């Protein structure tokens, strides 16, 4: 059974920092692209950051330079270090694991963790 379990969310003041963690089980972690997505109330879910098995990264323009995604394959864990947080970063943050091979693929989602940034 695949599980992605996020932790590290909470309430922080604008300008502060948080680190999210996502522990994965039930998958061959090292072959998956790991990502963080977020969904604010009334908005669609959006990509925040992804990191491929070869450590290529992609960031949303709104977080570039403030957020850093990293992964520890030995611990089957992906992290999102968030700095200089803004109220507009308030959202539920979801961990994603995606594997693609040609036309085949699969992905999994965590249950989400709330991040609230106060002004």
Image (cartoon, rainbow, N blue to C red):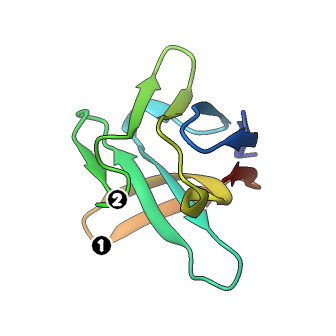
Residue at x-position 77% and y-position 55%: 111
Q: Could you tell whether 97 is left or right of 66 in the image?
A: right
> Which structural element holds mark 2?
strand
Q: How many discs mark residues in the rendered view? A: 2
Q: In which quadrant is the N terminus drawn?
A: top right
Residue at 36% x, 60% y is 62
Residue matched to label 1: 103
45 is higher (above) or lower (below) than 25: below
Q: How crowded is mark 2: few (under 14 residues within 10 Å), some or many (20 or more)?
A: few
Taking the view exactly as shown, the residue that stands out farthest to the front is 119
**Mark 1 burial class by Cα count in 10 Å: few <14, some 14-19, many 20+:** few
* x and y, in percent, of residue 69 in the image: 41, 36
**Image coords of residue 85 (percent x, y):** 53, 44
Q: In this view, does 48 lie above or below 14?
A: below
Where does residue 104 sit, x and y in percent of width and height? 37, 68
Q: Give the spatial CA distance, label 2 vs label 1.
A: 7 Å
54 and 31: which is toward the camera: 54
Q: Which mark is residue 100?
A: 2
**Between 87 and 92, the one nearer to me in the picture:** 87
Give the SS element for disc 1.
loop
- Give the x, y percent position of residue 68: 38, 35
Q: Which residue lies furthest to the bottom in this view?
A: 42
For residue 14, which quarter of the picture? top right
* Badge 2 vs badge 1, beta-carbon distance below 8 Å: no
Q: Residue at x 44, y 27 (%)?
A: 71
- The residue shown at (72%, 52%) is 116
Query: Which residue occupies the foreground of this view, 36 or 98?
Result: 36
Check the image and report above or below for 40 versus 8: below
Q: Residue 119 carries which label?
A: none
Return the residue nearer the eye: 36 or 96.
Answer: 36
């Amino acid at each position: 059974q695949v599980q992605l379990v996020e932790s590290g969310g909470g309430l922080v003041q604008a300008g502060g920092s948080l680190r999210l963690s996502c522990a994965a089980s039930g998958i061959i972690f090292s072959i998956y692209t790991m990502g963080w997505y977020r969904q604010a109330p009334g908005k669609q879910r959006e990509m925040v950051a992804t990191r491929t098995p070869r450590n290529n990264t992609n960031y949303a323009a709104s977080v570039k330079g403030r957020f850093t995604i990293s992964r520890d394959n030995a611990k089957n864990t992906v992290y999102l270090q968030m700095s200089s947080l803004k109220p507009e970063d308030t959202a539920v943050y979801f961990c994603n694991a995606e594997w693609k091979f040609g036309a085949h693929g699969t992905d999994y989602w965590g249950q989400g963790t709330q991040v609230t940034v106060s002004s």
